[in-house]
Image (cartoon, rainbow, N blue to C red):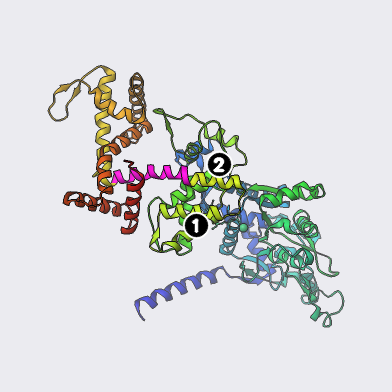
Amino acid sequence: MSEDSRKFTDLIEKDRAQREGIEWRGSFLEYLEKVKEDPHTPKLAHARMHEMVTRHGMTDVRETGDSRLQRLYGDEPVRVYNFFKDEFFGIERTISQIVRYFHSAALQGEESRQVLYLMGPVGAGKSSLIEKLKRGLEDMDPVFAIEGCPMAEEPLHLIPSHLRKEFEKMLGVRIEGELCPVCRWRLKEEYQGRYEDVPIVTVPFSRHDRRGIGVVPPVDPNNQDTSVLIGSEDISKLDMYSEGDPRVLDLNGAFNVGNRGMTEFIEVFKNEAEYLHTMITATQEKFISAPGRHGTVYVDAVIVAHSNEAEWQKFKGDHTNEAILDRIVVIKVPYNLRLSEEVKIYEKMLHSSGFRAHIAPHTLEVASIFAILTRLEPTSKCDLVTKLRLYDGEEVVEKGKPLKINVRELQEEARREGMFGISTRFIMKSLDNALADSPEGINPINVREALISMVKGADLPDDTRKRYLEFLQDTLHKLYLEILEKEITKAFVYSFEEQAESLFQNYLDHAEAYVNKTRVKDRNTGEELQPDDSFLKSIEEQIAIVGSAADGFRQEVMAYLWAASRRGEKVSYQSYEPLKEAIEKKLMSSVRDMSRVITKARTRDEEQMKKYTDLVNALLERGYDENSAEVVLRYAANNLWKD
Ligand SMILES: Nc1ncnc2c1ncn2[C@@H]1O[C@H](COP(=O)(O)OP(=O)(O)O)[C@@H](O)[C@H]1O
Ligand SMILES: [Mg+2]
């Protein structure tokens, strides 16, 4: 056997052994022993779901050590669940609310008898969240069920009602639910009522086998046959069995299938009221009717529904729906509003779509900035780009000072934020379009162009289109040029970080001496020098600190850094945002002339040629490929350094 085949066989055998370890078959009596051993065995659907999403652990945002998250959520009890963490970005609040619903429902609170309803704009992740739950259910250990039961029902239903109290005490569990008509019949006819002998098996959940996961797509309103929900009578069997024999039943509706797991209603409010009433009865009473004259069937499932806001508003506006509204837990699924998280969404989507072409640095960032700008509401407190930065947990500097705007207050005054704007799918489509036009790869420039042409062609109200085009042609253009200039400076300035750090140290030495009215000791010669005021000014003027403002600024810098080092933080040029900005700008201005000459020149002499090659190489190191490096340099030459 080759090395590889051995590896394959190992994997297969190990998996098989593990699966066989989970599989079980025995009599009901043996099942009772199992329950006695572990009273958690017969969990209801919500409790299983809650266990599923919490068993991989979670972190309180206040304890993540992520100061950005803390600034965003303050004291709100938001948790990050490992179950969702790698696939969902920037919607911690929504996920926390979903898990909180499962938690109360698991404790058999009122929520266990309510529909979980996700409402949000297209492409905000509603279907994906539910998809994730479905996959999770498939990965859980199988449930124990009465063998052959069309609904894989909980074996404890076999215990007759007059004995339940006693069994509950002995087992330490609560018994809820009644045998389905088919099992009721079989118990009587096949086992002569000896329920202790009824065979019990493990049943894994599987979408493809339609077990534990039921789905109700929006149905043609002219053909709302409830068999989709509750199953039907098999007409071909009607001749074989006598009237009232439940063996004619095909209990294969979405509620039957979803029993013990979940039943999902896609675009729920597209359905007729009759459907919704069946849904509500199933949640509220935990019973559905059996098809034909076969009484009722107990169901235990997490019932999840979703739709967009317009459908929700329409439904809510109809007062005849009040009874239904009362039985729905609404959870908003807004678009993510955090830039760095938005980038992760596209990284994830591109990765899973097998996108192979080159993606130049800042490409997804540019697309994400656009997406988020369209999702924000304007505020009187700051401009939209500033808001975007604050939402991403950034410190924003204005007039040499960190801007003191409370992010939570911004969120409070814009409650509809995230419920409108450009969808993730729109952005993905524009990335695809950009690639179709330039198969060499995508970059900020061709993606912005693709976005512009998509917006021009989109079915949007005129003023919205105008606003979006302004974002793309104006706001984003400027923002990208800022990003690009910094990028080129970093590529130009050999060891940018080191140079920034050395400027920072120098600045500190001189500012400290200035503030304390002492002298600076030259690091090399040991000479005692006067603080170099013109050097300090050359940094400060980068962020428009001039004249009498300088004294205050120098004091603030010293105070801030002193406090930081007292807290045990490592102090660097990045510590104090205003100073960081000033230093970076200083470095940029120091190479601006050279950048311009090198990138703009039509013909380069030998020395210029070498500089240009070095620049390209530095960009390659920063994640560009030959093509995108050339594209962005040409773009810089044409747009960045106006003559
Ligand atoms: N916050 C998010 N985190 C991760 N992925 C997201 C997020 N929002 C949207 N997506 C992705 O966008 C795509 C569209 O989402 P989808 O679940 O189909 O949206 P909806 O059902 O709300 O219309 C999916 O690939 C989804 O994973
Ligand atoms: Mg969807």
Q: Residue furthest left?
A: 525
Crowd class of label 1 (few under 14; some 14 to 19; many from 20; radius 10 Å): many
- Give the x, y percent position of residue 460: 60, 51
- Give the x, y percent position of residue 233: 80, 74
Q: Is residue 113 magenta?
A: no
Q: Is residue 8 above or below residue 168?
A: below
Q: Is mark 1 within 8 Å of ligand 1?
A: no
Query: Which residue lies under the disc numbered 1?
Result: 430
The residue shown at (24%, 24%) is 534
Which label belongs to residue 539?
none
Q: SS at mark 1? A: helix
Q: Is the magenta region chiefly helix, strand or loop?
A: helix
Distance between mark 2 and mark 1 Cα atoms = 20 Å
Dividing the picture into quarters, in which one does residue 398 lie?
top left
Which label belongs to residue 376?
2
Ligand 1 falls in quadrant: bottom right
Q: In the rendered view, does 596 fall on the left or right side of 304?
A: left
Q: Residue furthest bottom?
A: 240
- Give the x, y percent position of residue 150: 72, 71
Q: Quadrant of the C terminus?
A: top left
The residue shown at (56%, 32%) is 409
Q: Is residue 489 magenta?
A: yes
- Give the x, y percent position of residue 215: 67, 64
Q: Is residue 326 something that shows in the picture?
A: no
Dividing the picture into quarters, in which one does residue 244 lie?
bottom right
Q: Between residue 439 and residue 643, name the one nearer to us.
A: 643
Q: Is residue 368 above or below residue 26?
A: above
Q: Between residue 222 and residue 462, name the one nearer to us.
A: 462
Q: Is residue 85 something that shows in the picture?
A: yes
Earlier in the chain: of badge 2 and badge 1, it is: 2
The residue shown at (67%, 64%) is 214
Magenta highlight range:
473-490
